[in-house]
């Protein structure tokens, strides 16, 4: 596996245009790793643009772009690139449900999700054992002996904090090493400020509803909520995951376009990625990591719910899955 900035540059050198594309609706880890890679390429005289799909909703993602002057362009469906343009996928892969494919040569991938092994990239660096994509990019700097700017270091540090849930989720030694290194360079008052802007005022009602609807069966917590955007549902899962006695969380939101799921698991035997796939049962798309995953069932696949309540269905599937593991 290639894993250095020099290897990547060898593959993209001479391109007319280089785009860096994180997953849709980028979160702090996706934003930080895109930004840090763009800055690193710029140091090697390779200009690039960060492009993404779907409006960013998370308030801390928006604040990040503001604090660090990160320039990212949102692209709509009409956006066209030249087929010859190079695209570096970051914190995502071809085939992810949360990645809109844009025309261009998908030459490289840098990710920390499970390897989907469904595409031939010229440059591939997928490390599922790493907690944050920000760590992978921090390692590129470290290996090349290039010190990141304070902005880049701060963004990467915050990316690691987010994806590892403050070094408690899927955290690898490399995450810790990068955290320690970046900590010495980063602007900690900016980190503090970001942490103080993690809940958007417009989302307070959704949080209140989530807590009101929260139900616990054994160590499984369920939250059913209406009309909630993807990133907010994930944040709600993280919130209820902290409730005493909850080891597994299944949050779901019924929306006009379908049902969105968000899963957390702190139980070794229950893989969040497998659980969300089991709940969805081939009706939509879903996946993620061992401890966190998400999924979506589109509205045209909802026929199976005709005589069933969504709440009952979700509880039934989840409990069936967990019981199979003999840990309930
Ligand atoms: Mn990530």
Image: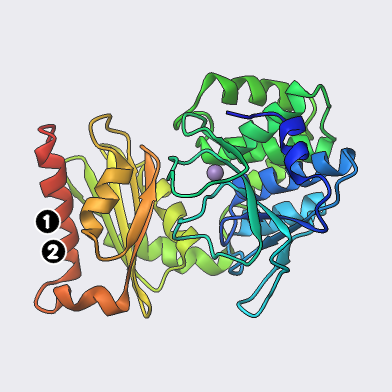
Mark 2 — residue?
312
Q: Quadrant of ligand 1?
A: top right
Name the spot of residue 252 as percent of width and height, x first. Answer: 31, 62
Above or below, 100 relative to 234 = below
User: Along the horizontal axis of the image, is 49 left or right of 254?
Assistant: right
Kindly state the secondary structure of the residue where label 1 is placed. helix
Q: Residue at x 42, y 59 (%)?
A: 233
Note whether residue 261 is visible: no
Q: Residue at x 85, y 35 (%)?
A: 149
On the image, which quarter does residue 291 sit in? top left
Above or below, 77 relative to 208 = below
The quadrant of the picture occupied by the N terminus is top right
- Residues at circles 2 and 1 in contact by the CB criterion of under 8 Å: yes
Q: Nearer the viewer, residue 38 or 181?
A: 38
Above or below, 87 relative to 325 = below
Name the spot of residue 70 as percent of width and height, x first. Answer: 78, 54
Q: Nearer the viewer, residue 230 or 208?
A: 230
Mark 1 — residue?
316
At label 2, counting other C-alpha atoms closer than 10 Å, the crowd grade (few under 14, some 14-19, many 20 or more) is few
User: Along the horizontal axis of the image, is 264 left or right of 55?
Assistant: left
Q: Residue at x 46, y 56 (%)?
A: 96
């Amino acid at each position: 596996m290639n894993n250095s900035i020099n290897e990547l540059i060898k593959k993209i050198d001479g391109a007319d245009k280089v785009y860096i594309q994180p997953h849709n609706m980028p979160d702090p880890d996706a934003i930080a790793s895109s930004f840090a890679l763009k800055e690193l390429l710029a140091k090697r005289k390779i200009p690039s643009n960060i492009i993404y799909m779907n409006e960013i909703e998370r308030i801390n993602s928006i604040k990040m772009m503001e604090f660090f002057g990160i320039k990212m362009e949102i692209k709509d469906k009409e956006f066209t690139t030249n087929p010859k343009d190079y695209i570096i996928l970051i914190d995502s892969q071809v085939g992810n449900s949360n990645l809109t494919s844009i025309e261009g040569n998908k030459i490289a991938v840098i990710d920390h999700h499970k390897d989907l092994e469904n595409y031939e990239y010229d440059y591939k660096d997928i490390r599922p054992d790493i907690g944050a994509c920000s760590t992978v990019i921090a390692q590129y700097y470290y290996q090349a002996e290039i010190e990141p700017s304070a902005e880049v270091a701060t963004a990467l540090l915050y990316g690691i904090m987010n994806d590892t849930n403050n070094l408690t989720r899927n955290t690898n030694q490399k995450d810790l090493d990068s955290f320690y290194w970046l900590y010495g360079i980063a602007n900690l008052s900016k980190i503090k400020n970001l942490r103080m802007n993690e809940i958007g005022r417009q989302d307070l009602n959704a949080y209140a509803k989530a807590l009101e609807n929260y139900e616990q069966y054994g160590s499984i917590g369920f939250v059913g909520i209406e009309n909630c955007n993807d990133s907010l549902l994930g944040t709600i899962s993280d919130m209820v995951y902290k409730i005493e006695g909850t080891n597994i969380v299944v949050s779901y939101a019924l929306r006009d376009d379908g049902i969105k799921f968000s899963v957390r698991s702190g139980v070794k035997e229950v893989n969040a990625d497998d659980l969300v796939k089991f709940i969805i049962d081939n009706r939509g798309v879903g996946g993620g990591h061992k401890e966190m995953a998400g999924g979506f069932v589109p509205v045209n696949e909802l026929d199976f719910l005709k005589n069933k309540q969504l709440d009952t269905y979700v509880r039934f599937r989840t409990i069936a899955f967990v019981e199979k593991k003999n840990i309930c």
